[in-house]
Image (cartoon, helix red, strand yellow):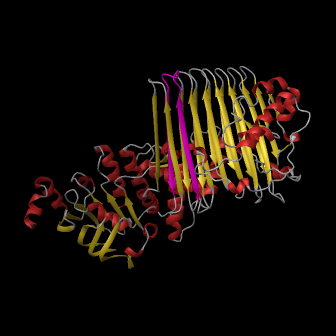
Amino acid sequence: MMNNLQNFQIPAGEPLWLQQIRQTGLQYFQQHGFPTTRQEAWKYTKITSLAEQIYHLPTKTQLSAQQITEHLIPDLDSYLLVFIDGQYQAELTILPANVILCELTEALTRHPALVQAHLAQIAATEKPGLNALNTAYMQTGYFLHVPAHIRLTKPIQVVFLTTEQPQPTAYQLRNLVIADTHCQLTLIENYIGMGNSNYWTNTLTEIQVADYAQVEHFKLLQENQAAYHTGSLNIRQFAHSQFNSHSFALGGRLVRSDIDVIQAAEHANCELNGLYLAKGKQHIDHHTTIEHAKAYGRSRELYKGIINEQGRAVFNGKVLVRQDAQKIDAAQTNKNLLLSEQAEIDTKPELEIYADDVKCAHGATVGQLNASELFYLRSRGLNEPTARSVLTFAFANELLEFVNQTPLRHYLRHCIIQQLAQDPTILEML
Amino acid sequence: MLSIKNLHANIDDKAILKGINLQVNPGEVHAIMGPNGSGKSTLVNVLAGREEYEVTQGEVRFEQQDLLELTPEERARAGIFLAFQYPVEIPGVSNINFLKAALNNVRAARGLAKLDAMDLLQQVKDKMQQVKMNPDFLYRSVNEGFSGGEKKRNEVLQMLLLEPKLALLDETDSGLDIDALKIVADGVNALRNSERAIVLVTHYQRLLDYIVPDFVHVLSGGQIIKSGDKNLALELEQQGYGWLTEARA
């Protein structure tokens, strides 16, 4: 199977171990190609149009400082890394002390042992999907190492901006995070499409969460309406660690976002929260897997979807409890709001349990706006579109309540309202 | 002000209102009583424009307008207010912003300018004092986590702010202890004047000790079977509805 990446080169002169990793990815992809709807995990998400598109390397775009600042989270005091069209913007970086935060190829040169020890160790390269292609062609991304006992009080904001391009472009992004014991960090990945051109972001993030470490990860998907986004977030948790994921899928023509968490030691705790908004002809697919490999683990998952017009969403949440993983407490909820006749959701919880002393719960709902609630707002003088927007926002709001940083919460609230509102004056009200 | 003639309404093809006739003039307070399932809540909900109910016959005029042609929001802007039996919780929308939106919509319909933030806040706080609500409730989501009594007081607060011409109260007294009942009644009485009318639906006579009605109507089987003054409510308290419904049957 040939890939569709025009002029993408695997860099020469890389260390042998990295060449081997890339080779593994390349071989897997050559054998298996793009995933198809014949594969269970891709049953509802057809990416033929992506597979048949030829993608080019981007031409360099200069953005003014103001154009870049417009895409940062307002009032958020954060560390910062900016990528524009897959190019790292060193001059914009704001670095924390006592921590390694840099671009991936720079990390390969300066911290080869650290990178070698973890890269492609957490995410499976050889699995259906696009991990293999990412591993073969990874170009850039961020590398973060937070040493033991370091607690970062400010979040790290990583922005992936894609500009308007004359030809379809593709970005193979690769991120690696090593959170050592007892450290604490918050990471925000923000994917933003600026223009209207067709591009494809294929991004893969690996995070190792050591004993007692606490990691909070945000993924904000604001790709443009012509863009394809395939993303894979891979977590390995150790004893007593805490990992929280917040996913906000607000943009993109077609989105496939995977999260795979492995709790590889006892007393690990994870929470996965997600909101997806699909409208127009958007297709948004989330697949999450939480693997409880050891005992006393806990997981919580809440994903909510709002689907309007001809939007389509897919949610598949799998909880896998291994034989050794006794005393697991896992709960998963997926709630969907369908706002039009044509809107569609395919939701599927999957429990696979091999231990006998566990507590696992799951539930999925699909519904519409509540007529009594609509009437309540209208009976107070709010017109119908406003009332609908307010209630739709209220449905989404639960996910914002998990966001502790006020500027980030305000930003997200604004982005969500922009996506949802039929009536822009609703902003005044919320 | 409000004139209901031969009003029939269905829900899910089941007839609930079967020919209601009622005339409400400015300054009057009407109490609607009656056994469970008689159509009391349906009546006030139909008047406020709830769309699940289908009006099959009859006419309702509100100040020269064909009320049944108006959307719920148009009715609100025309001066009709329904205090809900079960006020709805709206997470993510603060009470103050909700009150602001409601008030500004209704004011705009009356040709009044938007209130500036300070004036609005002052007005709201004054009215909150009137219904003995803690100002903290302003910054909480609408009705979210409110007790039953707090929700009812929040309804009265909205009513006091919106200053309707016609206030409809749907069992606003249910589930209230005596202190809360007095607060709600004081709120309603504060609104009473020669230009406003109030229609209140209640199960119990005790609310009428505090809000003394001009007229009491008994609704049964979707029709008003008896009307009288406040003494009718006392009679019902002592004798129940049996003597009325049996007499009819």
- As for residue A321 lying within the magenta part, the answer is yes
Q: From the viewer's side, name the closer residue of A383 and A372.
A: A372
Judged by its main secondary structure, the magenta piece is strand
Residue B109, compared with residue B120, is above or below; it is below
Query: Which residue extends farthest right?
Result: A13
The percent coordinates of residue B175 (x first, y second) are 30, 46
The residue sitting at 77% across, 34% down in the picture is A24
The percent coordinates of residue B240 (x first, y second) are 13, 55
Query: Which residue extends farthest bottom?
Result: B64
Q: Classify residue A145 as left or right of residue B195.
A: right
Query: Exactly how many numbered labels are in the figure?
Result: 0
Q: From the viewer's side, name the closer residue of B2 and A113.
A: A113
Residue A216, compared with residue B208, is above or below; it is above
Q: Classify residue A49 as left or right of residue B19.
A: right
Q: From the viewer's side, name the closer residue of A60 and A290.
A: A290
Q: From the viewer's side, name the closer residue of B32 and A332.
A: A332
The residue sitting at 76% across, 60% down in the picture is A196
The percent coordinates of residue A56 (x first, y second) are 83, 53
Look at the image and tell me whether residue A143 can be seen: yes
- As for residue A346 lying within the magenta part, the answer is no
Q: Classify residue B102 as left or right of residue B184.
A: right
The residue sitting at 46% across, 26% down in the picture is A358
Look at the image and tell me whether residue B95 can be seen: no
Q: Which residues are magenta?
A: A311-338
**Rendering quarter of residue B212:** bottom left
The percent coordinates of residue B1 (x first, y second) are 34, 74
Residue B213, compared with residue B65, is above or below; it is above
